[in-house]
Image (cartoon, rainbow, N blue to C red):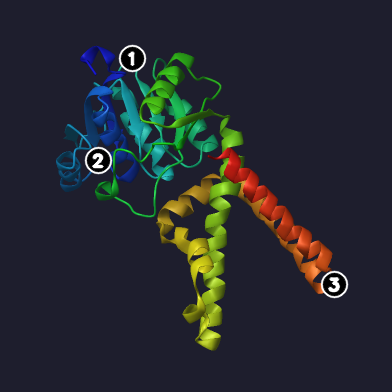
Amino acid sequence: MSEDNFIFDTIAIVGVGLIGGSLGMAVKKRRLARRVVGIGRTEQKLMRAKILGAIDHYSMDIEKGAEDADLVVVCTPVSLIAPTLQRMAASFKAGAIVTDVGSTKSEVVRQAESVLPEGVHFVGGHPMAGSEQAGVEAAFADLFLGATYVFTPGGNTDFNALGRLTELADAIGSNVEIMTPDDHDRATAIISHLPHVMSAALLGIAEQAQHESGKVFALAAGSFRDLTRISDSSPELWRDIVFTNKSALLQAIGMLQGSMADFKLALIENDEEAVMRFFEQAGIIRQTFQRISK
């Protein structure tokens, strides 16, 4: 690809960990920008990111490190996105596009639009990719291949900026979805945030039973490992996520409690037909999901 085909001249990535590092590697592998600049607080980590090929240059100047960037991607924890943007806002050049990779969007979009100056274009983003591993050492260029990359335009979104981000996401191999911030948060509360809560709750129950019998973990096999694998993730990360999506998550928890109450009643009443329908319906939904997600 020639220089004329770069989507952006300079991309700045704030927080070069798993997602930020993988994005930098993907951009560099496909020559989608002339240069990629990493911004962070720890020089050792930034040097490691450069050695691994995630960035070309780095800066520890949060306020001015992205002043030449055409695109700024904030890959910090959700609770730090708005404060980070507030620190950087005055140095962004006119016409710069700013996005994030946070797992919740309504609060992020609202806060970002309130702190950025006129002429700087924010578009909320969420690549639905990652792993339980963290840090740039776990990053790789093809992390986004086949993954869904959600953009959540707000009331003030510049649609040219949205189009350029869509082009970038497509170029790194992602499948783009456009949603409102509220629709995104309601969906992720069910398919991402609630499962993490359920995993933690199941582990707590298992630990309690282990203390009582001493045999529970000895019997745990594939199903238990599959259901609890996601609890290897950062507790601080998930604390921030659930509190920035509190309303949608509470609604999802209520829906789960209703479903569990129905199942519990069927079990108490020895309603074999209702229990059978419960599992049959789950199987049908699972098969449908597998077909449409291929």
Q: Which image quarter holds the N terminus?
A: top left
Badge number at residue 269: 3
Report which residue position mark 1 lands on: 94
Measured in 3D between alpha carbons, the distance from the residue under mark 1 to the one under mark 3, in whole angstroms, is 66 Å
Residue at x 58%, y 29% (from the top left corner): 180
Give the percent coordinates (x, y) of residue 15. Answer: 30, 40
- Using the rendered image of the protein, determine whether residue 39 is visible from the camera's viewpoint: yes
Q: Nearer the viewer, mark 2 or mark 3?
A: 3
Left or right? Give the position of 274 relative to 28. Answer: right
Give the percent coordinates (x, y) of residue 108. Answer: 48, 35
Q: Nearer the viewer, mark 1 or mark 3?
A: 3
Q: How crowded is the residue under tag 3: few (<14 C-alpha within 10 Å), some, or many (20+)?
A: few
Residue at x 30%, y 36% (from the top left corner): 14
Q: Secondary structure at mark 2?
A: loop
Residue at x 24%, y 36% (from the top left corner): 39
Vertical placement of residue 192 versus 28, above or below:
below
Badge number at residue 253: none
Q: Earlier in the sequence, mark 2 or mark 3?
A: 2
Q: Secondary structure at mark 1?
A: loop
- Name of the residue lying farthest toward the bottom: 213
Towards the viewer: 288 or 251: 288
Instruction: Count numbered badges in the picture.
Output: 3
The three-letter code of the residue at mark 2 reads Gly
- Using the rendered image of the protein, determine whether residue 121 is visible from the camera's viewpoint: no
Report which residue position mark 2 lands on: 40
Dividing the picture into quadrants, the one containing residue 121 is: top left
The three-letter code of the residue at mark 1 reads Ala
Towards the viewer: 242 or 49: 49
Q: How crowded is the residue under tag 2: few (<14 C-alpha within 10 Å), some, or many (20+)?
A: many
The three-letter code of the residue at mark 3 reads Glu
